[in-house]
C-alpha cells in the first residue's frame, strides 16, 4: 500500500516517505499512559503522625497515632453524619489509651477529669488493668473496636455525661459499619460476618439514640461539638432507623422551621423527610 508521502523521492526527499504522520502524538500518549501507571502507592501510615498526651490519671506520657488534619479526602457523609474518607478510616484513631493505667477516652474527652473521676478510674480500672502495648504503626478494626469498648467502660466508671457515652456508642456503631464495608463479598462467610457487624452496629446506635435523647433533656449546647440543630437531626435519623417515626418526624419538622438551623442542615433534613415518608408508607402498606 502506497504511503501518503510517497512521491517525495522526485524532490530528493525519499528518506521522508516512510515517516509516521502521528508519531509525535503517539509518543505523547505513551508518556501519559506511563505516568498514569506510576501513581505512587498510598499507605495508611501516610495519613498518621504521633501525638503526645499526658494521662490525667497517672501522668504517664502517651504517644498516640493521630490522623493528620486535612490530609485525607472526604468522599461523602452518611445520612447519620458519619464521614467517609479515601484510603483511611479515621474512626480507628480517635480513642486514646494509657497503656500504664488503662484510662481511655475519645480525643475530645481525654483531659479535664475531676479528682473523684480519677479515683474511680484508679479503683475500678487501673487496679485490674493488664498493661498492653499501644504504640503501633496502625490499628486493625478489631483493635479499634476494643479501644472503643475500653473508652465506654471508662466513661461509665467516671460517671461521664450521657452525651459522652452516646458519642462513643455513635462512633462505635460507625466503626462496625466501616468493618462491614471492608469485607470481601466473594468470601464464603461474607453474609454471616456482615449480619454480625450489622447487629453490633445497631446495638451501638440504639444506645447512642438513648444517650442523646437523655442528654437532650439535661445538657446544654454545644454537645459533643455539635449545635442544637445537628443533635436534633442526628437523633431524628437514629430514631428513624429504629422505627420511632413520631420522634423523627417531630424533630425534622422542628429543624425545617428553626431560625437557627443553617440552610445546609435544612437541606439534610429535607432529604431525611423524604426517606421518612417512604418508610412510613412502606410500613403502613405492610
Image (cartoon, helix red, strand yellow):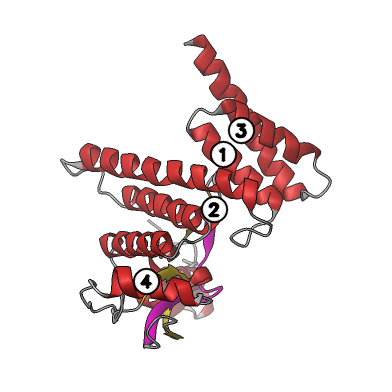
As drawn, the label of residue 121 is 4
> Residue at 22% across / 78% down in the picture?
131
- Lower position in the chain sequence, tag 2 or tag 1: 2
- Foreground of the two, 285 or 53: 53
Does the residue at mark 1 contact the one at mark 3 (Cβ under 8 Å)? Answer: yes
Where residue 127 appears, as percent x and y from the top left, is 25, 74
Distance from Cα at disc 1 to Cα at disc 3? 7 Å
Number of numbered discs overlaid on the protein picture: 4
The kind of secondary structure element at disc 1 is helix
Q: Which residue is mark 1?
A: 237
- Foreground of the two, 197 or 118: 118
Q: Which residue is mark 2?
A: 76
Horizontal side, residue 227 vs residue 190: left or right = right
Dot 4: few (<14), some (14–19), or many (≥20) neighbours within 10 Å?
many
- Lower position in the chain sequence, tag 4 or tag 3: 4
> Residue at 33% across / 59% down in the picture?
149
As drawn, the label of residue 248 is 3
Distance from Cα at disc 1 to Cα at disc 4? 34 Å
**Magenta-tinted stretch:** 61-76
> Residue at 37% across / 42% down in the picture?
203
- Lower position in the chain sequence, tag 1 or tag 3: 1
Amino acid at each position: 500500500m502506497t504511503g501518503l508521502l510517497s512521491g517525495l523521492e522526485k524532490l530528493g526527499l525519499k528518506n521522508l516517505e516512510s515517516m509516521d504522520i502521528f508519531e509525535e502524538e503517539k509518543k505523547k500518549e505513551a508518556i501519559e499512559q506511563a505516568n498514569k501507571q506510576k501513581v505512587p502507592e498510598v499507605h495508611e501510615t501516610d495519613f498518621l503522625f504521633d501525638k503526645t498526651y499526658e494521662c490525667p490519671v497517672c501522668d504517664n506520657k502517651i504517644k498516640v497515632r493521630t490522623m493528620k488534619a486535612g490530609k485525607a479526602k472526604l468522599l461523602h457523609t452518611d445520612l447519620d453524619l458519619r464521614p467517609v474518607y479515601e484510603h483511611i478510616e479515621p474512626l480507628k484513631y480517635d480513642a486514646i489509651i494509657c497503656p500504664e493505667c488503662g484510662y481511655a477516652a475519645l480525643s475530645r474527652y481525654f483531659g479535664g477529669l475531676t479528682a473523684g473521676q480519677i479515683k474511680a478510674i484508679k479503683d475500678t480500672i487501673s487496679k485490674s488493668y493488664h498493661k498492653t502495648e499501644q504504640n503501633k504503626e496502625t490499628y486493625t478494626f478489631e483493635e479499634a473496636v476494643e479501644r472503643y469498648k475500653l473508652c465506654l467502660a471508662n466513661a461509665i466508671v467516671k460517671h461521664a455525661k450521657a452525651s459522652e457515652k452516646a458519642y462513643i456508642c455513635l462512633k462505635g456503631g460507625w466503626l462496625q459499619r466501616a468493618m462491614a464495608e471492608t469485607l470481601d463479598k466473594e468470601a464464603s462467610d461474607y453474609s454471616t460476618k456482615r449480619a454480625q457487624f450489622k447487629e453490633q452496629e445497631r446495638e451501638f446506635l440504639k444506645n447512642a439514640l438513648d444517650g442523646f435523647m437523655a442528654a437532650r433533656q439535661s445538657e446544654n449546647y454545644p454537645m459533643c461539638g455539635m449545635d442544637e440543630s445537628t443533635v436534633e437531626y442526628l437523633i431524628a435519623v437514629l430514631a428513624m432507623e429504629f422505627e420511632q417515626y413520631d420522634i423523627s418526624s417531630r424533630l425534622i419538622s422542628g429543624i425545617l422551621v428553626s431560625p437557627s438551623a443553617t440552610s445546609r442542615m435544612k437541606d439534610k433534613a429535607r432529604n431525611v423527610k423524604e426517606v421518612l415518608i417512604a418508610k412510613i408508607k412502606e410500613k403502613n402498606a405492610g
